[in-house]
Amino acid sequence: MNSNLLPLHQKINQRVGHIAVSYKGKLLVWGGYMEFSDPSESETHHHATDELFVYETHSEIWERKLLKGDIPPRSSGGCGVVLGDTLYIFGGVVRAEFEFDGNTNDLYALNLITMTWSLLKPKGTPPIPCEKLVGWEHGGKLYFFGGFGPIPDRHVFFQYVIDDETGSAWNNQFFGYNPQTNNWEWPYVNGEPPSPRAAHAGDKCGHRIFISGGRLKTVRKNDLYVLDMDTMVWSGNINESAEYVPPGRSWHSFTFISSHRAVLYGGFSTYNNVLNDCWFVDISSHEGNVTEGSTSNASRWKVQYILPPHAQRFCLRRFWHKTVFIEKTGDLICFGGFNRFNNPPLIVVHGDDEESIQDQDLKPMTVGSWTYHLLIYLS
C-alpha cells in the first residue's frame, strides 16, 4: 500500500520496531511497521523512511518533516541515537519490495537542521549485522550493545548463541562509532558483561549505561547490568542485591526519570504473555566501596523495585514500544507497540517535582503528580 494513502493516525501512531528519541525537548519518531487488522490488506506495512514525525508535548501537536538525501530502506528493529544535531540509525531488518532482505549493519546519519540523510562508510572492523539492540552516546561517540543477527563470519571477541530454528544468533557485541574519525571502535572492557541477548532495554544515566532483561533462546531475562563508561567496567548482575525482582521480559522499556529512578514498563514474558505492569526502579551505588582495579562488584549496588499504588500498577498491555523522557518538560512519553489486539495510542505521563510523588494524595488515573493521558490523533 502507498504510505501516502494511509490515514494520518495510522502513519503516526500505529508502529512497532520504530525509532523514538528526544531532541531539543521534542519527541522524534521514524520508521518501523504496522499490522493491518483488515484481512483484505497485506499482513504488514513498513512506514516510509523519507519522513520524520515530531511531537511537541506542550501543544500536543505532531509535525511531519520530509527528508532528502540517501534515504534508508524501509526497516524495523534498528537503533537510533541522537548526538548533537544528528540522528544516527544503525542496524535492523531491511524490507526490500515485498520481502525481507535480512539484517544490516549500515549506519545512516540524519542532519536534523537540513533534514538530509547520509549513508556513512566507517573505516575499521564493522559490527555484525543485527536487530533489537540498544545504543547511546557518550563523550562525543556512539555505542551499541547486543542484538540478534547472522552468525559471525570471522573470529570475534564477543559471545554469541545460535538459534537452532533460524540459524541466526544472539550476541553481546559491544562496539562504538567515532564520528570525528569516521571509524568503528571496539572498546576494551573489564568485569562481567551481560550474556548475549536481544530485545533488551537500556538507558544512560550520567556516565553509566544500564542494560535490562532481553531474550536468549526461550528465556526472557530479569537481570540488570551497569557499564561505567569512564572506567569501561561491567558491574555484573546488580539485581542480585534486590529483595524482589519483576518477572523476566523482552521488548520492554527501561527509562530514567531522575538521577536514581527509572521506570520499567511492559514487555513480553517467558510464557509468551504481554505484560502490563509498571515499576519504579530505585538505584543507588556505594562509590566508596570500589577499589582501584576492581571489576565485577554487583554487591556495591542497591536496587529496589516499587509498584506504584494499586490503581496505577497496571497499564495497557504493551510490548516493543518506546519510552522517552523529555528532560526539558519532565514528561515521560510511551509511544507505539503491540498489545495483541491493536496498536495502542500514545501515552504521555506529565511529571512535576519527583520528590512530591510519594507525598501527594492519589486520585483515579494519577500517580501522585503524574497523570496518564491517552491521546489519539485521528486526522
Image (cartoon, rainbow, N blue to C red):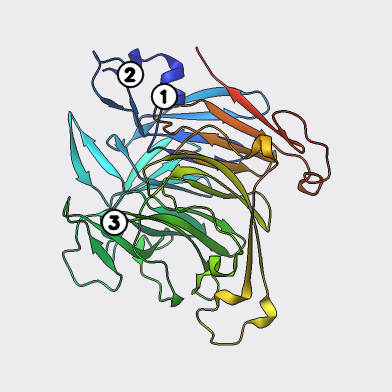
Q: Label 1's element?
A: loop
Horizontally, residue 337 falls left or right of residue 33, namely right
Residue type pointed to by label 3: Lys
Callouts 1 and 2 close, C-beta under 8 Å: yes
Which of the numbered marks, if any, corresponds to residue 7? Answer: none
Q: Earlier in the sequence, mark 3 or mark 1?
A: 3
Please rate how many residues cluster around mark 2, counting C-alpha atoms within 10 Å: few if below 14, some from 14 to 19, many from 20. few
Q: Which of pointers 3 and 2 indicates the residue nearer the eye?
A: 3
How far separated are the C-alphas under marks 3 and 1? 27 Å
The residue that mark 1 highlights is: 342
Q: Label 3's element?
A: loop
Outermost residue on the bottom side: it is: 292
Give percent across and percent down for residue 246: 53, 53
The residue that mark 2 highlights is: 37
Question: Residue at left 51%, top 37%?
Answer: 113
Please state which of residues 178 and 4 is positioned toward the viewer in this rendering.
4
Residue type pointed to by label 2: Ser
Horizontally, residue 174 falls left or right of residue 296, namely left
Give percent across and percent down for residue 337: 44, 34
How far separated are the C-alphas under marks 1 and 2? 8 Å
Give percent across and percent down for residue 132: 36, 49
